[in-house]
Amino acid sequence: MPGDAAAPGGEAMTPRRSRASEAAKPEEGSDAAAANREPEGRGASAASLPAAVRGALELAEARRKLLEAEGRRQLVSELESRVQQLHRVFLEAELRMANRAESLGRLGGGVAQAEIYLAAHGQRLKKNLRRCQKARAPALLASALGLGSCVPWAACRMRRGRGGAPEPPESPFKRSLPGAAAASSQPPGRARP
């Protein structure tokens, strides 16, 4: 250890201590070195590695970039489909509004024509209404009597006023009471017990 004695003041010992401390903490140093190399770039670290490892790292990096690009492409595709769906919704809403505006325009035109007609013929229509109110009740009665002959159960009511008109044949719609069938089968002189 003549080299140690030649260097008083411990200048030669400092490098050995730092080497020993670095040897004692190889894992921490390699982690820190790897962390420092990451921001610098992969080109410097890849140059010191063998070709097979370098190729594997480049392949992994390319796969990662491809997956990121695929994720972005799917996101863009989904956003594009949503935009197209919104576009279709807005087009349908616009068509509905155009149809409603057209129908409202036709309705407004009809109202305007009705107002013009009422302005031109209002007096005549009022006179006709006054005249028709007197004859309205008999017309309603006649229509009710006419419709009454359309229903099967109204036929017997219509026959009352005829007197001796012959009975029509049995109708399939005629209701028969359960007690009436038993009473009609007995002779008229006998009463039911």
Image: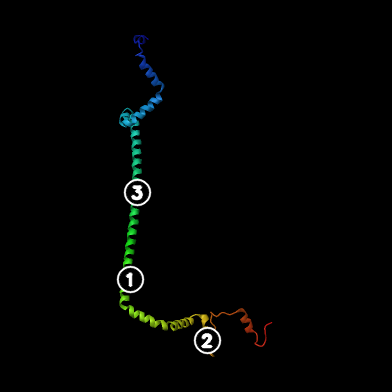
Q: Quadrant of the C terminus?
A: bottom right
Which type of secondary structure does the marked residue at label 1 adopt?
Answer: helix
Q: Is residue 73 left or right of residue 144?
A: left
Tell which circle, 1 or 3, labels the residue nearer the N-terminal end. Answer: 3
How many numbered tags mark residues here? 3
Pointer 3: residues within 10 angstroms few (<14), some, or many (20+)? few
Q: Which residue is mark 1?
A: 111
Q: Which residue is mark 3?
A: 79
Q: Is residue 151 above or below residue 67?
A: below
Q: Which residue is mark 2?
A: 159
Q: Residue placed at 41% from the left, 81% from the top?
A: 133
Which type of secondary structure does the marked residue at label 2 adopt?
Answer: helix
The answer to which image quadrant residue 6 occupies is: top left
Q: Residue placed at 37% from the left, 27% from the top?
A: 32
Question: How far apart, in angstroms, are the residues tagged by discs 2 and 1?
Answer: 50 Å
Q: Residue placed at 32% from the left, 59% from the top?
A: 94
Q: Report the amino acid beneath label 1.
A: Val
Foreground of the two, 39 or 49: 39
Task: Nearest to the eye among marks 3 and 2: give it.
Answer: 2
Tell which circle, 2 or 1, labels the residue nearer the N-terminal end. Answer: 1
Residue 134: x and y, percent?
A: 42, 83
Question: How far apart, in angstroms, are the residues tagged by discs 3 and 2?
Answer: 80 Å
Residue 88: x and y, percent?
A: 34, 56
Tell which circle, 3 or 2, labels the residue nearer the N-terminal end. Answer: 3
Residue 167: x and y, percent?
A: 54, 87
Foreground of the two, 15 or 109: 109
Residue 42: x and y, percent?
A: 32, 31
